[in-house]
Structures are given as structure tokens and as C-alpha cells.
């Protein structure tokens, strides 16, 4: 079964760090492009970061220099290292598989999400 | 930067009604437009990709159309299990979601 399971969320103080994990099953993270998407309370989804199968990475402007996306091929796991966290980073964080051009680069597999709360 | 808008929101309709949600892009995105359904506490679900292609496993009452800047998602006969928020997303450039349309039963 194709599945994504996130972990690593929690309560962290402003300025702190967290590392989110996304364990994949049923497909290879390294052979696919993967994204992190977050949804703050009462708001719509916001794309956060993308890693292409070739390894290139991209970030939304608000997290550049603070967040790092990576993957561990043998563990078939995607990560999001989040540093210098701010209150506006509070959200449910989802990982998603990004399809190729044949599916218009749609996000066709999603995890259930992990909650990050940044508060003192 | 491309901006996405959706209408209406919210949307209230009766079981069996035909429901149409509109999504507009601030510039042409060809057919790089995807639709998702999101129920509270669940993972978002891809319904439609490339403006009009039905994702595997999605009921045929869902359909999409459009190209360029104007797109629609149609539910041909609204069912109770369709209560959710629906988001369009452009994949022409940096992924961007619309603000969402919350659908409930009248």
C-alpha cells in the first residue's frame, strides 16, 4: 500500500528547532519528487518545500534559510529540519508525493499530518 | 506572482444538487490546475489533475474543466460524504493553493 506517515511535531518555543520525518511505504522517496505543505489554523494549505528526484530543493520565501528539506534513501524517509521557528510557523505539516508531468505535477499521495505549535 | 481565487465560499446545497466551484488564476496556467478535497482530521485527497483528469478511485460524480485562467470543479450529485473543503492548486510554477471552498449540506 502506498502510504506516508509523518512524525516529529510538537510544542516548541520561538527560536527553537524541530525535525519532521515522513516515512514512505509502497514507493521510493528517492525516485519521486516530494513536498512539504502546511496548513495554519483557519487557513488554506501553503506549500513549504520541494525536493526533486534529482535532488534539487526549493522553498517558499518565508522559510528560506531556516528550513531544510532532505531525504534518506535507505530509510525511504523525507525530512524537514526547521530552525529559528516563529509563531507563524504554527501549523499542521503534511508531506506529499509530487507526480510528474503526466499528472500535472499534482500531489497524489499525502500523509495524515503532524502538528507543530510554536509558543512560549 | 500568480494569485489564485475561488468562489463561492462557503457553499451550501442539498443532497442530489449539482454543485460548481470556480477557481481563477491571475495569469494563464495552461491546464496545470489540480483539485483537492480536504476533510477535517484527514489527509487531503487529490480529485482532479491537469484540469480535467479524474484521479484513480475518485467517484465519477466529480469532474473538472477549464484552461488558461478559469477552471471549474463540478459535483454532479452532491452526497453527504462530499462535505469538505475543496482547494484548487496551480502547478504551473511554485505550487500555490486557492483559499478553498467549504461545502456543506443544506
Image: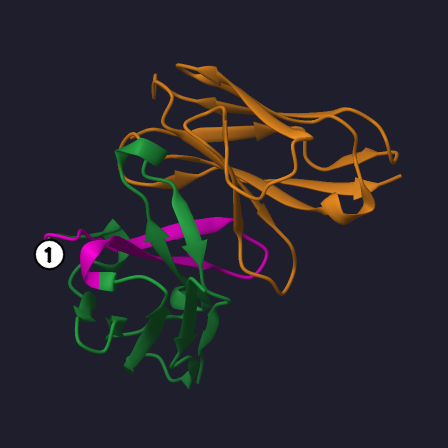
Chain colours: A green, B orange
SS of the residue under disc 1: loop
Q: How many marks?
A: 1
Q: Judge whether B54 appears above or below B44 on screen.
A: above
Q: Position of residue B56 (x, y in %)?
A: 51, 41
Using the image, name the chain to which the residue with label 1 belongs. Answer: A
Between residues B94 and B35, which one lies in front from this camera angle?
B35
Asked if A55 appears above or below B83 in the picture, the reply is: below
Residue at 27%, 40% (x, y): give it.
Answer: A100
- Whole-percent x and y of residue B30? 34, 18
Residue A49 in magenta stretch: yes
Q: Nearer the viewer, residue B58 or B35?
A: B58
Is residue A61 within the magenta segment? no
Q: Looking at this view, is A75 or B51 the one in front?
A: A75
- What residue does disc 1 label? A55
Q: From the viewer's perspective, is residue B62 above or below residue A47?
A: above
Q: Which residue is at the front of the view, B28 or B35?
A: B35
Question: Image check: A6 left or right of A19?
Answer: right
Q: Residues within 10 Å of mark 1 (few under 14, many from 20)?
A: some
Tell me residue A10's x, y (percent): 44, 83
The magenta span reads: A30-55
Residue at 83% across, 27% down? B17
On screen, residue B7 versus residue A28, left or right, reads: right
Q: In this image, A64 relative to A103: left or right?
A: left
Which quarter of the rendering shows the C terminus of chain B? top right
Locate the N terminus of chain B by quadrant.
Answer: top left
> In the rendered image of this protein, does residue A30 appear above or below residue A33?
below
Residue A22 coordinates in the image, percent (x, y): 34, 72
- Does residue A114 appear in the picture of this structure? yes
Say which residue appears at 32% left-offset and 76% top-offset. A21
Image quarter of residue A110: bottom left
Examine the rendering and report whether any part of residue B91 can be seen: no
Amino acid at each position: 500500500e502506498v502510504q506516508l506517515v509523518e512524525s516529529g511535531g510538537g510544542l516548541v518555543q520561538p527560536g527553537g528547532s524541530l525535525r519532521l520525518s515522513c516515512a514512505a511505504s509502497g514507493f521510493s522517496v528517492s525516485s519521486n519528487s516530494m513536498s512539504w505543505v502546511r496548513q495554519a489554523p483557519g487557513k488554506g494549505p501553503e506549500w513549504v518545500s520541494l525536493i526533486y528526484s534529482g535532488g534539487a530543493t526549493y522553498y517558499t520565501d518565508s522559510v528560506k534559510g531556516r528550513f531544510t528539506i532532505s531525504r534518506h534513501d535507505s530509510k525511504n524517509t523525507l525530512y524537514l529540519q526547521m530552525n529559528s521557528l516563529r509563531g507563524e510557523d504554527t501549523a499542521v505539516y503534511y508531506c506529499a508525493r509530487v507526480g510528474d508531468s503526466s499528472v500535472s505535477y499534482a500531489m497524489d499521495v499525502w500523509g495524515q499530518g503532524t502538528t507543530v505549535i510554536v509558543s512560549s | 506572482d500568480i494569485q489564485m481565487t475561488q468562489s463561492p465560499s462557503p457553499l451550501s446545497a442539498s443532497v442530489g444538487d449539482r454543485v460548481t466551484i470556480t477557481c481563477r488564476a491571475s495569469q494563464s496556467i495552461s491546464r496545470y490546475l489540480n483539485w483537492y478535497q480536504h476533510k477535517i482530521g484527514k489527509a487531503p485527497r487529490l480529485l482532479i489533475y491537469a484540469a480535467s483528469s479524474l484521479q484513480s478511485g475518485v467517484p465519477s460524480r466529480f469532474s473538472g474543466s477549464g484552461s488558461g485562467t478559469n477552471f471549474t470543479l463540478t459535483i454532479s450529485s452532491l452526497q453527504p460524504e462530499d462535505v469538505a473543503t475543496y482547494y484548487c492548486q496551480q502547478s504551473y510554477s511554485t505550487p500555490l493553493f486557492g483559499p478553498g471552498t467549504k461545502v456543506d449540506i443544506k
